[in-house]
Image: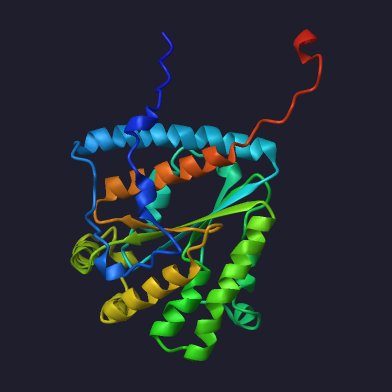
Amino acid sequence: MASKKKVVDKSSTPDYDRYRVLPSEPIILSKQDPDDSDRQEKKKDIEQELEFQRQRLQDLQRRLYAEHKRSLLIVLQAMDTGGKDGTIKHVFSGVNPQGCQVWSFKQPTVEELNHDFLWRYHQHTPQRGMISIFNRSHYEDVLVVRVKQLVTEDVWQKRYQLINEFEHMLTLNNITVIKFYLNISKDEQKRRLESRLENPSKRWKFSRSDIDDRQLWDDYQIAISDAINNCSTGYAPWYIIPANKKSYRNLVVAHIIADTLEAMNPQYPKTEEGLEKITIPD
């Protein structure tokens, strides 16, 4: 017997839009609760809901790919151990890789440094029909460079406007942009770093530079707050996702992405006329 399709009760849908940062309501990152959750269910219940959101995502991604007119750019930012890789793994499990690409941005190469700071990101924005995920992004150029004083304040201050113009240009070219900051506490980061050290299979992820960056925690909190406040726009919003609880983090991100695609409402192309009369020859 075929399983019944789950029906979404809109009246009982959690208000995940509350994690969206409005341009008119600037935030202070240190005051955002990384443990926030409106769910008291067991982890298995959250996983069941996550699976439903993944099914929504898979269906909508197929339609986006088939329509081949628009695309979606997803930006993921976080402190070290914030869960970018885990979010990608658990939210996009089952999505057809033919229509989805992940780009991770490390320290820029010599060639990249010889161009403007947005050059290396622009060439990885999604083609029509595609979903692109930036694992770290152009926001590194107003975060790391600011905190570590790699460029002067006069340089990084001007980049907020350039980033907004870049993202606006993308939206004018039928690329929907949504951005997630995965918000963990300093205590949670410590637990995750210790877990990496204790687990031989995860130790490769650990770097001594993680300790150096941890010493700059407060500076990063200020820089991230400023970046989000300056660059959360109506056309390219930022969402601050409570990320101490991994299962809740995954559910919220999946739900927001699925809602975004649903609002885009991609459609399968019209089929040729008369196909219902065709008989496939032996």
Q: Is residue 212 left or right of residue 232?
A: left
Quadrant where the image shows the C terminus: top right
Q: How is the image coloured?
A: rainbow
Q: Position of residue 233 (x, y in %)?
A: 51, 62
Q: Is residue 70 left or right of residue 86?
A: right
Q: Position of residue 153 (x, y in %)?
A: 47, 89
**In-front residue for pair 273/133:** 273
Name the residue rendered at 43%, 36% in the picture.
54
Q: Is residue 18 left or right of residue 94?
A: left
Q: Is residue 216 above or below residue 244?
A: below
Observer able to see residue 222 = yes
Quadrant where the image shows the N terminus: top left
Q: Is residue 18 above or below residue 238?
A: above
**In-front residue for pair 209/233:** 233
Q: How many marks?
A: 0
Q: Is residue 116 above or below residue 134?
A: below
Q: Position of residue 200 (x, y in %)?
A: 25, 61
Q: Position of residue 224 (x, y in %)?
A: 38, 72
Q: Is residue 277 left or right of residue 263?
A: right
Observer able to see residue 281 = no
Residue furthest toward the front? 24
Name the residue rendered at 33%, 65% in the picture.
205
Name the residue rendered at 30%, 75% in the picture.
210
Name the residue rendered at 43%, 64% in the picture.
24
Q: Is residue 142 above or below residue 4?
A: below
